[in-house]
């Protein structure tokens, strides 16, 4: 038998069979992904082979079919291991906001760095537009110009008023989409606007910290009435990259990679202090964003500050 994993709750998985039946399943044996140290061997979106467990009526997952793609992040609980977020997706949908909670531009670039190695198209949604003041709209205009100029789709939306939802539905139709974002940006509220029948639980922003509180605790795939599937993932607080080398950071800032062939050291250039660096030259001419460059340097330094043992432990 074969099926698609539609929910992950740790050691148990819900699998939708080809006839539409949903089984509770557990994994038999050890499954690995390219010898990476994973906290979870299976992700929502995986196509799996399974058999019935006679005693309980549950399913036993025996293997994972070849993946079209997958997304991993550094585990938030085990810094030397990776967490498999989703697989076999057509696109990623990042929900953020300018205010409530306050925008962290560095998080956008960290998210893009997470999906860029797998060439997954990304839609960036700036939610809670109903709360924006004039200064917030100016920030949005800057971010829209920046990321659309890099080839990403940017949408201004409001889960409260429904603005932007029609445009978003058109992009989600007939696609498998991974939905992600920091806690408190209104992912669940926006998904309820997209499909009201889901009635997902929503939370408030903490008055003390100004941060969101988790309402989605497990990844789950939801079918969309108008066609397509959306994988709702738990809110992300931090993103680390123990599995990437410094040159991979440089290669996955797409505008830097496009210029790297013009650098003296080509693909080996880290665009920092190297002579005849095309990226540094473009920065001086204001042809690339200083914000993106600053975020790049911060991530690069973070990776280099981790010694080789830290980055490679158990890998």
Image: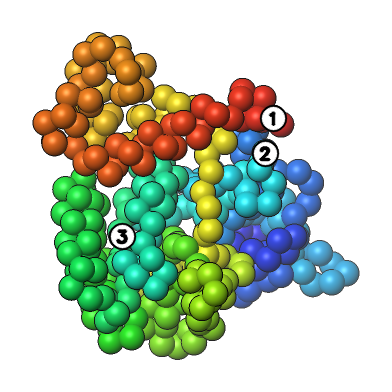
Question: Mark 1 or mark 2: which comes first in sequence?
Answer: 2
**Quadrant of the image for the N terminus?**
bottom right
Q: Are marks 1 and 2 in contact (CB under 8 Å)?
A: yes
User: Dot 1: within a 10 Å radius of its alpha carbon, few (fewer than 14), some, or many (20 or more) residues?
Assistant: few
Which residue is labeled 2 in the image?
80
User: Is 237 on the left or on the right of 300, as rendered?
Assistant: right
Question: Residue at point 68% right, 71% down?
Answer: 23
What residue is drawn where x is 44% and y is 62%?
181
The residue to which callout 1 is attached is 313
Residue on which disc 3 sits: 124
Q: Assign the C terminus to one quadrant of the image.
A: top right
Question: In the image, is 12 to the left or to the right of 190?
Answer: right
Task: Compare residues 37 and 177 and report the one nearer the observer.
Answer: 37
181 sits left or right of 43 in the view: left
- For the residue labelled by badge 2, is the local secondary structure a helix, a strand or a loop? loop
Which residue sits at x=62%, y=44%?
A: 82
């Amino acid at each position: 038998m074969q099926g698609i994993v539609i929910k992950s709750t740790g050691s148990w998985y819900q699998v939708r069979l080809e006839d539409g039946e949903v089984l509770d399943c557990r994994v038999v044996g050890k499954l690995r992904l390219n010898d990476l140290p994973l906290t979870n061997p299976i992700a929502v979106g995986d196509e799996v082979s399974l058999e019935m467990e006679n005693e309980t009526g549950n399913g036993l997952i025996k293997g994972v079919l070849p993946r079209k793609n997958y997304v991993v992040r550094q585990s938030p609980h085990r810094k030397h291991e990776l967490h498999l977020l989703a697989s076999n997706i057509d696109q990623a949908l990042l929900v953020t906001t300018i205010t409530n909670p306050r925008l962290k531009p560095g998080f956008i670039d960290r998210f893009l760095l997470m999906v860029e190695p797998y060439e997954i198209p990304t839609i960036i949604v700036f939610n809670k537009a109903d709360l924006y003041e004039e200064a917030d709209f100016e920030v949005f205009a800057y971010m829209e110009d920046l990321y659309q100029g890099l080839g990403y789709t940017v949408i201004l939306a409001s889960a409260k008023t429904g603005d932007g939802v029609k445009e978003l539905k058109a992009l989600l139709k007939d696609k498998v989409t991974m939905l992600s974002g920091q806690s408190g940006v209104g992912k669940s509220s926006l998904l309820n606007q997209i499909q009201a029948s889901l009635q997902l639980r929503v939370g408030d922003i903490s008055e003390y910290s100004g941060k969101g509180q988790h309402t989605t605790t497990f990844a789950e795939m939801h079918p969309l009435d108008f066609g397509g599937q959306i994988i709702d993932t738990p809110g992300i607080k931090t993103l680390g990259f123990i599995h990437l080398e410094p040159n991979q950071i440089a290669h996955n800032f797409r505008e830097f990679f496009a210029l790297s062939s013009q650098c003296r050291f080509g693909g080996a250039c880290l665009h920092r202090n190297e002579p005849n660096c095309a990226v540094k030259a473009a920065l001086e001419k204001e042809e690339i964003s200083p914000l993106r460059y600053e975020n790049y340097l911060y991530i690069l330094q973070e990776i280099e500050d981790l010694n080789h043992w830290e980055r490679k432990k158990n890998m």
